[in-house]
Image: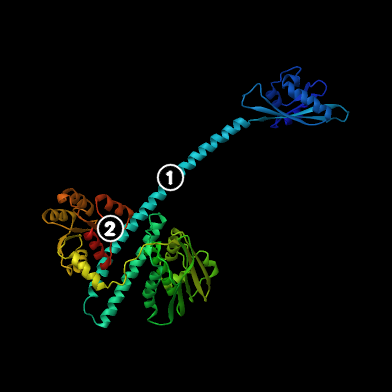
């Protein structure tokens, strides 16, 4: 080759060469082809450097004027490399024909191993990053849970005092104005408690800690209860009417009655919040019964402000309301509808919404529920008769109240005192253990988080020294709602957990149930 041509060809990444068609003698070759084929000075023949099968196919391709592509193992370099050849017949102006060769190193195996190695290294690095992010997320989630548990305790403790004293005060002789003030305090306290419960419910659902407890339930009775509760909110102005419509002869079904009631209250309260004039209609329709399974359609329809179309698809997202101005004007956490959706889905149902701005909204729930063949106790039993029955069981029983806050002890003591039990008060776990050694105790109401000795250690100590093998019922009465606290209560030997603030009737009922066992 001429010097310039030779230099240019040597700069190419490919191996380039020219052979005689007749003899396959290599006439010209650049440095790459010389190195790859191991060509030496003097005569070099292509047939000395390629496989016999490929040589035969090259000759046939030359005869037919076609390109021929083949690969062979390199003989002078790494065995991981192969050379890919393209052989093509070319005609010169003087009618001379030559065989043009283009060759390139193919490191496919080597490259593949390199790629796999690089990908494995990258994958390991990404896995480490993911693990770090996972640990960060778990730490953040744990911090959130700890914060919620702490805030729950700090908010519920004073609320327990407020609502407890309101209940006691309502039993006294008050003027109409005083009753109005008292109801205002009670309503505000319950509203604050509802907000706390919503945040905690959402956290439970997110972490899958929330468990449903299906019981035999009269859905119609729950609808009537909600109507009576929420209907009172319509009464002051009279501009909004709440109507209910129920299918006749509704069967008893198995469902978590507390959570179903929570769903209906949330939807009706939501309708009341955004409806200034007109009506709210709450319907429960039995649509079909087949093989002991009932299909129900629950609808809450209002004539309120409605929801704009762009917000409608996000209405069940947490912390979402119609707009920021809506939050300022109407308040709320923006969690109610999200909780409703997740509870309905946990029950195996579906919730949908249709709405028109400035016309109103309709929320519909479809539920499939098994029929219950059990019966429900007589709900018409008078409170006086129930109170007399409870008093007869509690009278003379020795009950210990353990709490480090004097107000909490007082709130439990006052309603119990009317039923004439023998009461023992302790302000920490150590005092409780000492009192237990000195007195016969029939039941203990135990706070969990106390100085000196907490309720868990006190319960363990009491379980070790119980007399004659008699197991004393211990009910945890706590403002802490975390799953960890509930598990610790169980592991320490407590029988059940009562959450502050509590309703007096529920507390008395729990005590009676334990004393009756």
In the image as oriented, which residue stretches furthest toward the top?
42
Quadrant of the drawing holding the C terminus? bottom left
Position of residue 87 in the picture relative to residue 273 (left or right): right
Residue receiving disc 1: 132
Position of residue 89 in the picture relative to residue 186 (left or right): right
Q: Residues within 10 Å of mark 2 (few under 14, many from 20)?
A: many
Residue at (34%, 57%) from the top-left corner? 147
Q: Position of residue 467 (x, y in %)?
A: 14, 51
The numbered dot on residue 122 is: none
Q: Kindly indicate whether the residue at mark 2 contacts the one at mark 1 (C-beta within 8 angstroms).
A: no
Name the quadrant containing residue 171: bottom left
Q: Position of residue 475 (x, y in %)?
A: 24, 58
Mark 1: which secondary structure? Answer: helix
Q: Position of residue 300 (x, y in %)?
A: 46, 71
Q: Residues within 10 Å of mark 1 (few under 14, many from 20)?
A: few
Quadrant of the drawing holding the N terminus? top right
In the image, residue 220 above or below residue 105:
below
Residue at (51%, 37%) from the top-left corner? 121
Residue receiving disc 2: 497
In the image, residue 307 above or below residue 368:
below
What is the CA distance from the residue labelled 1 to the residue labelled 2?
A: 37 Å
């Amino acid at each position: 080759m001429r010097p310039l041509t030779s230099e240019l060809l040597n700069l190419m990444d490919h191996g380039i060469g020219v052979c005689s068609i007749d003899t396959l003698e290599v006439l010209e070759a650049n440095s790459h082809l010389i190195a790859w084929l191991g060509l030496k000075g003097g005569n070099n023949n292509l047939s000395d450097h390629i496989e016999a099968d490929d040589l035969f196919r090259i000759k046939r391709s030359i005869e037919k004027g076609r390109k021929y592509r083949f690969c062979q193992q390199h003989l002078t370099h790494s065995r991981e490399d192969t050379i890919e050849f393209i052989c093509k017949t070319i005609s010169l102006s003087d009618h001379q024909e030559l065989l043009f060769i283009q060759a390139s190193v193919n490191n496919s195996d080597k490259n593949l191993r390199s790629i796999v190695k690089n990908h494995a290294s990258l994958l390991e690095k990404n896995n480490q990053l993911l693990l770090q992010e996972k640990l960060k997320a778990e730490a953040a989630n744990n911090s959130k849970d700890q914060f919620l548990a702490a805030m729950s305790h700090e908010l519920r403790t004073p609320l327990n005092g407020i609502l407890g004293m309101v209940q006691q005060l309502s039993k006294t002789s008050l003027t109409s104005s005083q009753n109005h003030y008292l109801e205002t305090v009670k309503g505000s306290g319950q509203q604050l408690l509802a907000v706390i419960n919503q945040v905690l419910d959402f956290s439970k659902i997110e972490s899958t800690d929330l468990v449903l407890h299906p019981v035999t339930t009269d859905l119609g009775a729950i609808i009537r209860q909600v109507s009576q509760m929420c209907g009172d909110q319509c009464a002051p102005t009279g501009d909004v009417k709440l109507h209910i419509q129920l299918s006749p002869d509704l069967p008893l079904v198995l469902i978590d009655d507390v959570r179903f009631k929570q769903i209906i209250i949330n939807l009706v309260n939501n309708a009341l919040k955004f409806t200034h004039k007109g009506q709210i209609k709450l319907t429960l329709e039995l649509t079909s019964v087949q093989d002991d399974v009932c299909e129900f359609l629950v609808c809450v329809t209002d004539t309120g402000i409605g929801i704009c179309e762009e917000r409608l698809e996000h209405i069940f997202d947490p912390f979402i309301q119609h707009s920021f101005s809506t939050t300022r004007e109407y308040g709320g956490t923006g969690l109610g509808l999200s909780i409703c959706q997740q509870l309905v889905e946990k029950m195996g149902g579906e919730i949908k919404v249709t709405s028109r701005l400035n016309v109103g909204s309709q929320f519909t729930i479809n539920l499939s529920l098994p029929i219950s063949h059990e019966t429900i106790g007589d709900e018409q039993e008078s409170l006086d008769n129930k109170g007399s029955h409870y008093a007869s069981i509690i009278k003379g029983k020795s009950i210990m109240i353990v709490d480090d806050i004097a107000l909490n002890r007082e709130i439990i003591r006052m309603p119990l005192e009317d039923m004439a039990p023998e009461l023992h008060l302790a302000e920490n776990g150590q005092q409780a253990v000492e009192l237990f050694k000195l007195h016969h105790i029939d039941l203990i109401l135990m706070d969990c988080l106390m100085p000196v000795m907490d309720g868990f250690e006190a319960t363990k100590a009491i379980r070790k020294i119980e007399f004659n093998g008699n197991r004393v019922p211990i009910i945890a009465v706590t403002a802490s709602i975390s799953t960890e606290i509930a598990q610790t209560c169980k592991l320490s030997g407590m029988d059940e957990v009562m959450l502050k603030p509590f309703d007096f009737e529920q507390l008395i009922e729990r005590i009676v149930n334990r004393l009756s066992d």
